[in-house]
Amino acid sequence: MGKNTPLLPQELAALVLKAQDGDTEAFGKIYDEFLTPVYRYVVFRFPADLTEDLVADIFVKAFEKLHSYRPIFGVPFSAWLFRIARHTIIDAYRRNRGFEELSEEFVDESRESDPKLRTEQSLSVRRVREAIMKLPEDHRDVVLLHYISGLGHREVAKALHMTEGYVRILKFRALKKLEGLLSLSILPND
């Protein structure tokens, strides 16, 4: 998130109302709050050189559609925003088919000085990303929204139009599949 402590729900609600009334500074605070989780969600699916533009598109669309957000429907703002992110990603996939690059954004820069550790970490990130990308789309979305972007089960459910119970089931199934995929990926190739 953009700062050390996340916004309280009532603070976020007040900012959304101000932003809906045209207060760009309020939207800037919303942007600061959600930039990191949205970036993480996108960077895990796209090469780093496409990520920044895609994240910018997501926030532009959110700003343009902000008038349509209504908290009375029980959808948390984060779920509404990640729904926009998901649809923007789907559109980008349609435009950019055929790339399979790994973003190195998750590699710990503090280990830069040790090439062996950096290489091992990069390979681990690659294995995890490849395993996640092999999951069915609904499983993958749940994993990315929950673990990479940090959304709770309720927010994931709202973003994906699912029940919380179904999100929990998909998460459990996804973790089991990942466990199998990752254990296979560390076996020696004979």
Image (tube, rainbow, N blue to C red):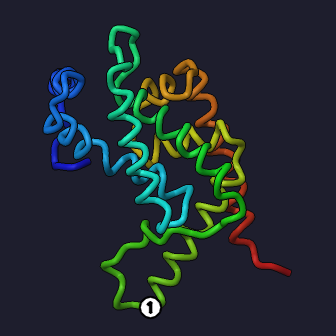
Q: Residue at x 42, y 67 (%)?
A: 105
Badge 1, how many Cα within 10 Å: few under 14, some, many 20+?
A: few
Q: Residue at x 31, y 48 (%)?
A: 35
Residue 114 sits in quarter: bottom left
**Foreground: 26 or 4?**
26
Residue corresponding to mark 1:
115
Q: Position of residue 2 (x, y in %)?
A: 21, 49
Q: Residue at x 26, y 47 (%)?
A: 1
What is the quadrant of the C terminus in the image?
A: bottom right
Does 18 sit left or right of 72 as displayed? Answer: left
* Vertical arrangement, residue 75 with respect to residue 144, above or below: above
Q: Position of residue 110 (x, y in %)?
A: 30, 79
* Vertical arrangement, residue 146 with respect to residue 181, above or below: above
Residue 91 sits in quarter: top right
Secondary structure of residue under mark 1: helix
Q: Position of residue 182 (x, y in %)?
A: 67, 61
**Foreground: 51 or 53?**
53
* Vertical arrangement, residue 32 with respect to residue 127, above or below: above
In the picture as drawn, the residue positioned furthest to the right comes out as 190
Does 3 sit left or right of 54 as displayed? Answer: left
| Count of marks placed on residues | 1
Amino acid bearing label 1: Pro
* Vertical arrangement, residue 2 with respect to residue 109, above or below: above
Does 88 sit left or right of 59 as displayed? Answer: right
Does 32 sit left or right of 100 as displayed? Answer: left
Q: Position of residue 159 (x, y in %)?
A: 49, 28
